[in-house]
Image: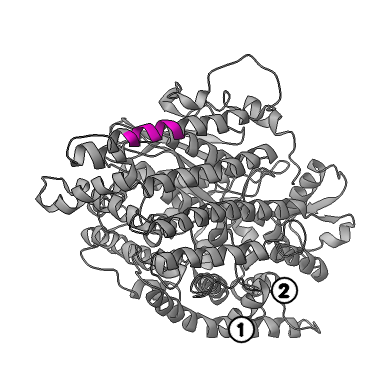
Amino acid sequence: MKKIIIIAFIAGMFLASCTQKAPKMKNPLLTEFKTAFGVPPFDEIKVKDFVPAYEQAIKEHESEIASITDNQASPTFGNTVEKLALSGRTLDRVASTFNNLNESLTNDSMQKVAQTVAPMVSGHFDNIALNAKLFERVKTVYDQRDSLKLSAEQQRLIEVIYKDFERGGANLSAENQAKLRKLNSEISLLQLKFTDNVLAETNNYKLVIDNKDDLSGLPESVIKAAAKTAKENGLGGKWVFTTQKPSMIPFLTYADNRDLRRQLQTAYIMRGDNNNEFDNKKILSKITKLRTQKAQLFGFKNFAEYVLDKNMAKNPETVFKFTNKVWDSALPIAKEEARELQKLIDDEGGNFKLEFYDWWYYAEKLRAKKYNLDEEMLRPYFELNQVRDGAFMVANKLYGLKFVERTDIPKYHPDVQVFEVLNADDSHLGILYMDWYPRASKSGGAWMDAYRKQSEGVSPVITTNFNFTMPSGDKPALLSIDEVETTFHEFGHALHGLLSNCKYNKLSGTSVTRDFVEFPSQFMENFSTDPKILKMYAKHYKTGEVIPDELIDKFKKSGLFNNGFVVVEYTSAALLDMYWNTIDDTIERDATAFENETLQKMDMMPEIIVRYRSPYFSHVFGGGYAAGYYSYQWAQVLDADAFSVFKEKGLFDQATAKSLRDNVLSRGNTEAAMDLYKKFRGSEPKLDAFLQRNGL
């Protein structure tokens, strides 16, 4: 397993040894948190608390379920559906605390806990989903729903709960229910193993450079960051680059040493594919087989049909039609970009063919040549805290929100920032955690989650996680354009959770369909690089100078530069996901052969590597995006269409912002996604703005 650098030191008592003797204390996870705003008391929680907390919370939830099924009174909305929706709060508290910490501050002990509790939790929720007496009561209320005097949200709640029972196997035969239990348990454990393997592979590789000449082309800030990484790894006097993107992408973009670029990117794309103890190929093939078996228990041909049945897209055919349309538009553009890069190589006297590890390097050279723009020219204007405050400023101007940093609220790591979020009238709205930098104990990528979701009388506690370039030497954290957009993206998810105003936890915040959940996040990305917004927050970290119009103009003119690459890299991953999840048989595939055949079928360019190769495609094989990775692009249609209204009426038009907040951001899953969107927009989204924005 990966090496963890004295986690107990940086996280305090939270990760104290399970074997260390201590006075017997009550498990802090099993009582309401007595902290400011009810955030987790991280300094009190120990790893050894989690398994007994899960065991007790599951027993408590079982008792709550029994009180519903044992009720001799006729089923009603209140004594059955609402009581079910309000049950399991202790388990929610334990699971949300553990899951978030396991993503952002894990170690071997935490991963063992995950492996222990995964089958417990899977089995527990199978017991609920397959509880015949409970389903009978829910079905009775569901069948009477039109004659009951229920609010729109209550109607939605009973529909969602009933559908969950159906999708959980309530209508299956006893034999198939037993099969489903086994499948769910196996899948949950395999997904954990897949994710752990990706993290281990990411942490285990280091490109160590001891010859200063091999740093040729790299900006000084990148060199200093690599020296800092080396020192942290006991390699002082050398330079270390990793497959974490803040380290890897600058190296691929600027390093003149072609062979070292090849080594680093090859290490990245071979994660989980090294025929070692962390190899994921057989794991992902088995996950696919088991998911297909699960889908077929419900009468679907494949897992994609099962997943999409509840999404906006509804079926694989719709997703393929949409994704292939984008692919067919983008591929010729990317091929033309490749020809341009090859010409640049030839003009420089390079006697080689463009390869995947050349693209970032020569694209940056071509950008500088065409637009006199180097991304390093932009970084000084995007100091991390200024970018964060820029996102806060947009939320303030749109919705009147205020963000007050709190240093008196518990946090799980020193790098984390905590903010109290206030409404325009200074009333409390929620708490926002922001965790910025990579570490060996943290998953890669960026994400938003909740330690506590909003419900009636309960304010949300939201967390956002990033893996951004760290401060180095006398320089603060200076973000790339991609990192700037990612900040606004995850903040958009956070707003979806913070602005939720629902009665029931089950429907609140981001509890929406997979292909709608990315709409609020991608909508916020539009503000990050709008020229008017840039002038408000993008200031040189040394001089305070506002980003000059000349630089903004260069940036905007280069807006579609390399876009063929970006769209092809993403869309190829979305299609690969769909091909894996539309397999109709239960044969375990050779993962490498299947991936190669699929990419060949798509006419994938060898000069571009699919954004996520199968062995490290954690969205699909380790998380909840199976048959759903298309959703980022699907949501781009919504966000481009929505932002066009703001461009027409004014970036901070209050009536439009209020409509978005009231009809989408505050409503969670209280209505079907398209109905919510139409209430905001007045019509279904049009494709025009999306195609125009992407030059397609």
Q: Residue furthest right?
A: 211
- Element carrying mark 1: helix
User: Could you tell me residue 475's position as x and y percent?
Assistant: 68, 44
Looking at the image, residue 653 sits to the left or right of residue 60; the answer is left
Q: Quadrant of residue 592?
A: bottom right
Q: Residue at x 29, y 69 (%)?
A: 685
Q: Which numbered marker is on residue 572?
A: none
Front residue of 570/254: it is 570
Q: Magenta stretch containing residue 61, yes or no?
A: yes
**Could you say where residue 385 lies in the image, as x and y percent from the top left?**
54, 42
Is most of the magenta stretch helix, strand or loop?
Answer: helix
Where, by quadrant of the figure, is residue 602 drawn? Answer: bottom right
Q: Which residue is mark 1?
A: 600
User: Which tag, 2 or 1, sits closer to the chain's start?
Assistant: 2
Label 2 environment density (alpha carbons within 10 Å; few <14, some 14–19, many ≥20):
many
Per the image, label 2 sits on a secondary structure element best described as helix
**Visible in this render: residue 636?**
no
Q: Nearer the viewer, residue 675 or 540?
A: 675
**Placement of 167 over or under 129, stated as above or below:** below
x, y percent for residue 9: 70, 28
> Quadrant where the C terminus lies?
bottom left
Left or right of 429 in this view: 535: right
Instruction: Give the alpha-carbon distance from disc 2 to disc 1, as whole Å.
Output: 21 Å
Q: Name above or below for residue 76 compared with residue 252.
A: above
Labels 2 and 1 touching (C-beta < 8 A): no
**Disc 2 marks which residue?**
358
Q: Amino acid at mark 2?
A: Asp
Q: Bin the neighbour count of mark 1 within 10 Å (Cα to Cα): few under 14, some 14-19, many 20 and up.
A: few
Q: Which residues are magenta?
A: 58-66
Question: For this rendering, which residue is in front, 273 or 305?
Answer: 305
Q: Is residue 395 left or right of residue 245?
A: left
Relative to 319, does residue 532 appear above or below in the rendering? above
